[in-house]
Image: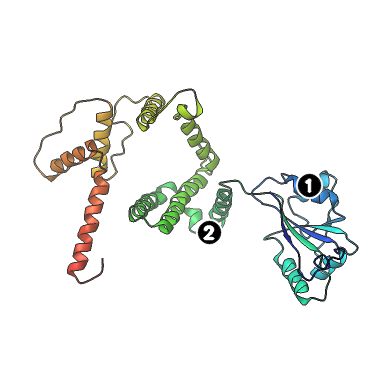
Amino acid sequence: MGYVRIVNETSPEARGEAAPGRIVLLTTSHRVAPGLLSWPAWQALRAADAVLCADGAHPQLPYLREAGIAVAETSPTAQELVDACAGGRTVVVVATGEGEPALTDGLARLAGSGRVAMPELELLPASYDLPGARLLDLVQVMDRIRAECPWSSRQTHEGLAKYGIEEAYELVEAIEAGDRAELREELGDVLLQVVFHSRIAEEDPDAPFSVDDVAGGIVAKLIHRHPHVFGDEEAETPEDVKEHWLRTKAEEKRRTSVTDGVPLGQPGLALAAKLASRTRTAGLDVPLPQGDGIGYELLALAVRAEAAGTDPEAALRAAARAYRDAIRAAEGLPA
């Protein structure tokens, strides 16, 4: 992608004189496999008069040396680094951690003094994070927490189940409230549940699986259920897509009843709407059970809402929020 070039306005180069060398600060991402460096990075490494690295365990070092790059394991001060560039030499520093802030701060102080002829300083990203790379950080953090935290190390799928429900409801609340910051946070909490359960599953003695197995499974499912994207089928409308999805899902599950797979533990209105959706999609004409009591009335309302394209759970929550606001207003409190 290139580099950021910093030239001091009082440097010899700015005054039209020969620049006293060049420092290239080479930064890499620990989320990318070592050795996968950009072409500008390899050019800078091969053209350098010296390559330095303060961390002898830096993951890039074996690959650099295998490629014939001589790397000195040393941690120079800012002044020593400037001196090493004397005579127009180029020194590449393979950065560690957060990009050698102590070294760059020292170089900034030298440049600010106006008493030192400063080399050019190039900040050259040698590798970049791919989309989703921070998920690797989450997996690593979860590994450590599972191993070292007294609470997390004792958790089970069963013990965490209630948190999955709570986090899902909090996510829905953030969506309905339209709070973008809250939405991002709640998505993270839901993602944590996935990674946490996957980490616990690795320890199962009989049927272990990892977060990679979880991700691989959903990738395969998405590809299979989107033949209009990854295959030869065509879909022009959302209805066509839904038809593909339902057909491939039915082939996968091989269910004997349209009610199979409907979780009975979900909230009542959602359960009623789901059963109504399954029945309508299957083209079944099933009369509603008749009975006395509010339950049957709510069932009829939920089925009617589903047929009209309304989520009865969301509708009831919206009405309940309005009722809550009315109660607070009656108490003289802000909504």
Q: Residue at x 74, y 70 (%)?
A: 108
Residue 300 place in picture, x, y as percent: 16, 39
In the picture provided, is 239 more to the left or to the right than 292? right
Front-most of residues 150 and 134: 134
Front-most of residues 246 and 231: 231
Q: Evaluate whether residue 224 shows in this view.
A: no
Residue 314 place in picture, x, y as percent: 27, 48
In this figure, which residue is indicated by the disc labeled 1?
42
Say which amino acid is labelled 1. Trp
Q: Is residue 6 above or below residue 66?
A: below
In the picture provided, is 10 more to the left or to the right than 236? right
In 3D space, how far apart are the residues under numbered discs 1 and 2 (Cα atoms)? 41 Å
Image mark for residue 149? 2
Q: Is residue 178 above or below residue 260?
A: below
Q: Residues within 10 Å of mark 1 (few under 14, many from 20)?
A: some
Total numbered labels: 2
Say which amino acid is labelled 2. Cys
Q: Residue at x 48, y 30 (%)?
A: 229
Q: Determine whether the residue tagged by mark 1 lies in a helix, strand or loop.
A: helix
Q: Residue furthest left?
A: 292
Residue 24 place in picture, x, y as percent: 78, 58
Q: Is residue 334 above or below residue 168?
A: below
Question: Can you tell which of label 1 and label 2 is closer to the viewer?
Answer: 1
Q: Residues within 10 Å of mark 2 (few under 14, many from 20)?
A: few
Q: Earlier in the sequence, mark 1 or mark 2?
A: 1
Residue 261 placement: quadrant: top left
The answer to the question of whether label 1 and label 2 lie on touching residues, with beta carbons closer than 8 A, is no
In the picture provided, is 45 more to the left or to the right than 231? right
